[in-house]
Amino acid sequence: MIGVRFVVMTLLVFVAGGWARAFREVRFLTLPAQAAVYFGAGLVTLALEMLVCSGFGIRWSVIGLLVLPVVGLVAQLRGHAVTPQEDRATAQPRNRATAALALLALLIFTSAVLSASATSGDFVFFWGPKGQHFGQVRALDVEFLRDPAHLVMHPDYPPLVPLYYAWTMLGAEQLDWFGAMGSAILFLALAAAVIPDARFAALFASMFSLLFLRNSVAGNAEPALLFFETLALAAILCKSDVVAAIALSGVALTKIEGAVFVVIVIALLWRRKLALIPLGVLGAWLLFAKANGLLDAYVPSQQLAWQYVGPALLQLGRELSFGLWYAPWIAVALMFCGLPGFPVARLPGREIVHAPGNRGTGQPGNLAAPLAALAFLLFLVIVYARPGAHMEWSAQRVLITPLVLCFFGAITRNANG
């Protein structure tokens, strides 16, 4: 089962992200949403520190990595002493039935994860071993990644998840494999915590628990990617630019398709100056990979073949069903069409739900998120229209990203409707 070290080191991730409380928009959030922000900010902070240390040949230590985040946390606690009444958003009334449904979905997912029946070879041969090796040598070991024998580990895959695993085992020699699998539960629970309405949160937890089980992603990077994507979209919906910048940075550091998500979201949903932060983080990782001879999966090994575009479209259309007769998409479509008038969450004196894409035009941006999803699907067609593509292996996992985009489009529709 999950060991004490993994639990303690994971709790310290929240501490490492506590500096985010310095921002008023974070302090206004409900406590579960604040926890999600702190965890996301902590993971991004630790991952960037670990990368910088590796670049300068400095071995990681728990104290060394926590010094700056803790100093930031202490400084903002002294400078922003506010009462709970000032500090928290007006919460919506609790609905016990929907809360119970969300909890039930998470419990079912938890039982599958902790029985080791919801993971895959990717975790056993890729994500886990990279994290364990990095933790053992206390560095992102570029020589290890450059070894031709490790090419299957994709040396240029963004490192946030292996770095998180390495963080949890600093001071030990072995990764807590059950803890690493169990982190999928935490990522999903925190993602559900930032959904604006309890009814949407129950559907979110149920839907993505099922998709995670069907795709056996415990221990892989998909749960972390979904968490950061959800946090980013919720922040954009609520006009929280600081949180959006943090979350999109996490997306860029989690998976290769996260880079595409970041570019699409910034182009279609979030045109802000702070967008330079996640773009800078993405650029920094690519420069690190290029400088150390790690670039591999970012550069397609085969040319786009136009004769494969048609077959790729047809197979992608089949994969969109998730093996569930398109039920997730039908549920999102019903959210668009059949649930008008959902309550809008408010802060004292200002509305926090805001339609992405509404840039002073006076028109709700209900279609911006679905357009972003279509752009992501176009990217997938381009990726899979190659002779050696294996869509049946990965498509249903990467299709979770356009689904969550459409999910937030439906929330926007109801918030404006």
Image (tube, helix red, strand yellow):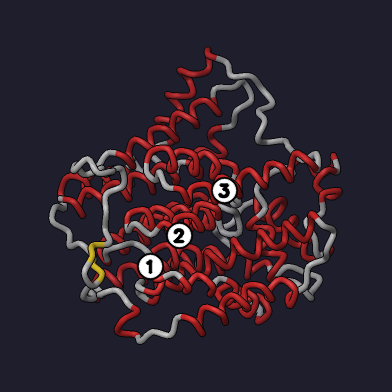
* Callout 1–callout 2 Cβ contact below 8 Å: yes
Residue in the image at 69% along x and 26% along y: 301
Residue type of the residue flagged with mark 2 = Val
* Callout 3–callout 2 Cβ contact below 8 Å: no
Q: Is residue 182 left or right of residue 60?
A: left
Viewer-closest of 239 and 137: 239
Residue in the image at 73% along x and 68% along y: 175
Upstream in sequence: badge 3 or badge 2? 2
Residue type of the residue flagged with mark 3 = Ala
Q: Is residue 402 left or right of residue 412?
A: right
Residue in the image at 74% along x and 55% along y: 130
Which mark lies nearer to you, 3 or 2? 2
* Callout 1–callout 3 Cβ contact below 8 Å: no
**Gap in angstroms between the C-alphas marked 1 and 3:** 23 Å
In this view of the protein, can residue 213 be seen by the observer?
A: no
Disc 2 target residue: 242
Disc 3 target residue: 252
**Gap in angstroms between the C-alphas marked 3 and 2:** 16 Å
Instruction: Please provide percent x and percent y for residue 312.
Output: 49, 24
Viewer-closest of 69 and 337: 69
Disc 1 target residue: 25
Upstream in sequence: badge 1 or badge 2? 1
Classify the position of the N terminus by image quarter: bottom right
